[in-house]
């Protein structure tokens, strides 16, 4: 007894195969885009660590020279600790929008405190040339500049992922597989 599928059965099988291939392709695309966010997050995290090391070394080097400005130095150290804490959470789940928002929110006090300390250092020209301070300032400036580019790469990866996740019919897969919305730094 030979089984010969009817025309309707063939059409249903072809449609099911197309849907299955589309689901696998859409899932793989979202996973690849999410992976790009992870790579970009690793770059941001590395630069945050470098900047954190530069801030810690700078604060230590300035403790004696700026004895009257301990509040500013403490504020910078505390802001750096807050950024580090938020970055640690982001590293665990880089696609979570709330985690990226926490890093972005922690950056505002960090930039304010860093600007204040840099302004204090610039008021003391001897500190700018000091071998204890100058290398840490250079490292801080370099890592901060590179951090801006790394953030842009992260934001571009997050935007590509979010755009792909919002497209129909891929948006149907986001609910099915639990893909969330990526945040921006």
Image (tube, rainbow, N blue to C red):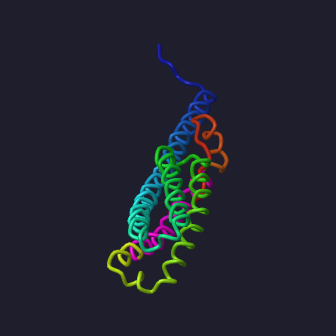
Outermost residue toward the front in this view: 68
Quadrant in which residue 106 is drawn:
bottom right
Q: Residue at the top extreme?
A: 1
Q: Nearer the viewer, residue 90 or 59?
A: 59
Quadrant occupied by the C terminus: bottom right
- Residue 126 position, x and y percent, is 41, 85
Q: Position of residue 154 (x, y in %)?
A: 52, 60
Vertical comparison of 51 with 87: above or below: below
Residue 170 sits above or below residue 44 on the image? above
Residue at position x 50%, y 19% from top?
3
Q: Main secondary structure of the magenta part?
A: helix
Of 119 and 105, the residue lying toward us: 119
Q: Is 172 or 153 nearer to us in this picture?
A: 153
Please provide percent x and percent y for residue 9.
60, 27
Does the magenta segment cover residue 154?
yes
Q: Position of residue 121 (x, y in %)?
A: 48, 78
Q: For the image shown, how many numbered marks are present on the structure?
A: 0
Q: Which residues are magenta?
A: 138-164
* Residue placed furthest toward the bottom: 125
Residue at x 41% of width, y 69% of height: 58
- Left or right side of 29 for 64: left
Q: Quadrant of residue 107?
A: bottom right
């Amino acid at each position: 007894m030979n089984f010969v599928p009817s025309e309707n059965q063939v059409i249903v099988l072809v449609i099911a195969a197309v849907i299955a291939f589309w689901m696998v392709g859409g899932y793989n695309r979202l996973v690849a885009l999410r992976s790009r966010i992870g790579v970009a997050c690793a770059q941001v995290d590395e630069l945050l660590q470098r900047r954190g090391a530069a801030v810690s070394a700078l604060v230590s080097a300035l403790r004696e020279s700026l004895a009257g400005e301990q509040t500013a130095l403490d504020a910078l150290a505390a802001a750096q600790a807050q950024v580090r804490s938020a970055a640690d959470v982001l590293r665990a789940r880089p696609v979570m929008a709330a985690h990226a928002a926490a890093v972005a929110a922690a950056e505002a006090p960090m930039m304010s405190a860093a600007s204040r300390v840099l302004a204090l250092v610039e008021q003391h020209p001897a500190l700018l040339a000091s071998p204890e301070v100058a290398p840490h300032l250079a490292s801080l400036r370099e890592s901060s500049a590179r951090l801006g580019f790394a953030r842009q790469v992260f934001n571009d990866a997050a935007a590509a992922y979010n755009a792909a996740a919002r497209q129909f019919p891929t948006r149907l897969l986001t609910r099915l597989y639990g893909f969330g919305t990526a945040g921006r730094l």
